[in-house]
């Protein structure tokens, strides 16, 4: 091949390789690839928020039919209903039914109402703390000429409770057992509590 032929061949090769950067002598410069900078942002995650406790829904107690009977059975069931109202009042702040069953002379009743109001006026309530007893083991003393009240005696078990709102943090109370005497009588066709002694 003549010299002029070799030159033409070289030009033809360069023309064919123009897109690949041929400069007639070795490899052409390559462009630096651009790479994305790695992100340094931490993934955001919302901190779980602890919801403020809310008072549980508590159903209003219903008196048993036996409470309509003026005898020892009625007295026991009336005492049972009274303790249910006590727990309901402390849980909800609704004192109406408890007060309706309390005689003005009942110091325990007055103190219990004041305590429930204090807790609820502070935005709190009581969870748990029910007073339970076995009605079959309760004893009753009938009214006499000198003592117009029935005395219902039993051993009550107080359930553990949590008092919210009265202190900065909820106040936990352990359960306990008490010997209880409830003095009550029938007034205008319904049992009314005149006193409660627990120890």
Image (tube, rainbow, N blue to C red):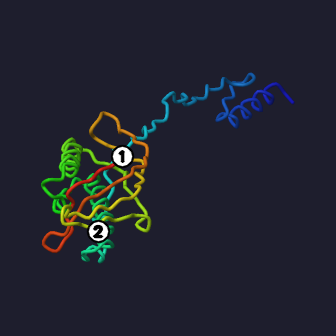
The one of 198 and 95 positioned closer to us in this rendering? 198
Q: Residue at point 34% right, 65% down?
A: 140
Mark 2 nearby-residue class (10 Å; few <14, some 14–19, many ≥20): many
Residue for point 40% across, 42% down = 173
Q: Is residue 3 left or right of residue 24?
A: right
Residue 121, how many percent across, how many down?
18, 44
Please give the label number shown on residue 181: none
Where, by quadrant of the figure, is residue 143 drawn? bottom left
* Disc 2 target residue: 75
Residue 51: % across, % down = 36, 44
Residue 57 placement: quadrant: bottom left
Is 183 or 24 nearer to us in this picture? Answer: 183
Secondary structure of residue under mark 2: helix
Image position of 186 (left or right of 26): left
| Residue in the picture at 67% in, 33% down | 20
Asked whether disc 1 touches disc 2, contact meaning CB atoms under 8 Å apart, the reply is no
In this view, 66 is above or below 78: below
The N terminus appears in which quarter of the rendering? top right
**Category of crowding for the residue at label 1, using alpha-carbon neighbours closer than 10 angstroms: few (below 14), some (14–19), many (at least 20):** few
The answer to whether residue 128 of the structure is visible from this angle is no
Which residue is denoted by mark 1 in the rendering?
199
SS assignment at label 1: loop
């Amino acid at each position: 091949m003549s010299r002029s032929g070799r030159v033409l061949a070289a030009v033809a090769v360069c023309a064919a390789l123009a897109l690949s950067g041929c400069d007639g002598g070795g490899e052409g410069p390559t462009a630096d690839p651009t790479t994305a900078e790695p992100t340094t942002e931490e993934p955001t995650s919302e901190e779980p928020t602890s919801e403020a406790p809310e008072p549980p829904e508590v159903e209003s107690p219903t008196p048993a039919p036996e409470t309509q009977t003026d005898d020892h059975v009625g007295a026991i069931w009336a005492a049972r209903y009274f303790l249910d109202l006590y727990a309901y009042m402390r849980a909800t702040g609704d004192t109406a039914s408890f007060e309706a069953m309390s005689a003005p002379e009942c110091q325990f009743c007055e103190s219990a109402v004041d305590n429930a109001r204090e807790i609820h006026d502070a935005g709190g309530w009581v969870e748990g703390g029910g007073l339970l007893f076995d009605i079959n083991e309760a004893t009753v003393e009938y009214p006499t000429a000198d003592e117009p009240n029935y005395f219902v005696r039993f051993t009550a078990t107080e359930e553990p409770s949590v008092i919210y709102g009265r202190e900065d943090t909820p106040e936990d109370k352990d359960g306990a057992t008490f010997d209880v005497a409830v003095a009550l009588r029938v007034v205008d066709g319904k049992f009314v509590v005149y006193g409660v002694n627990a120890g």
